[in-house]
Amino acid sequence: MTEPDRVPRRLVLGATGEARRTCAALERLGDDVVHLDAPTDRELAAVLATGIDSLAVLLHDDTAALRYCLAAEHLSPGLPMFVALFD
């Protein structure tokens, strides 16, 4: 839950057109967006440690997308997530 005067921080994963468009849409809404194409486990952990409010995983590799979601749940239990499975 975000505080009313705090800008939500969103993490978007993926090097897809969908990921870029999602980042642009969230930024238009005034959200603080962090976009990573294909982070390592260490990079994902470092970003999640900065206080992310939600995660969108938009990859065309379903196995990698699910792996990112499982890692994020482990690192930040209960984090709201959206994952798109394309295949």
Image (tube, rainbow, N blue to C red):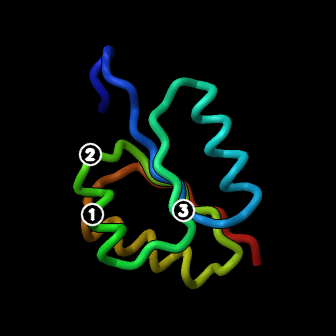
Label annotation for residue 13 = 3
Q: Amino acid at mark 3?
A: Leu
Bin the neighbour count of mark 1 within 10 Å (Cα to Cα): few under 14, some 14-19, many 20 and up.
few
Q: Amino acid at mark 2?
A: Gly
Judge by depth and name the residue closer to the eye, 65 or 27.
Answer: 27
Mark whose residue sits in front, 1 or 3: 1
Measured as percent of width and height from the top left, residue 26 is found at: 59, 35
Outermost residue toward the bottom in this view: 63
Q: Earlier in the sequence, mark 2 or mark 1?
A: 1
Quadrant of the drawing holding the N terminus: top left
Secondary structure category for the residue under label 2: loop
Kindly identify which residue carries mark 2: 51
C-alpha distance separating marks 1 and 3: 14 Å
Q: Residue at x 32, y 66 (%)?
A: 73
Kindly identify which residue carries mark 1: 46
Mark whose residue sits in front, 2 or 1: 1
Q: Residue at x 76, y 78 (%)?
A: 87
Q: Is residue 50 left or right of residue 21?
A: left
Residue 25: image quadrant is top right
Q: Residue at x 39, y 39 (%)?
A: 9
Q: State if disc 2 and disc 3 touch (CB < 8 Å).
A: no
Secondary structure category for the residue under label 1: helix
Q: Earlier in the sequence, mark 3 or mark 2?
A: 3
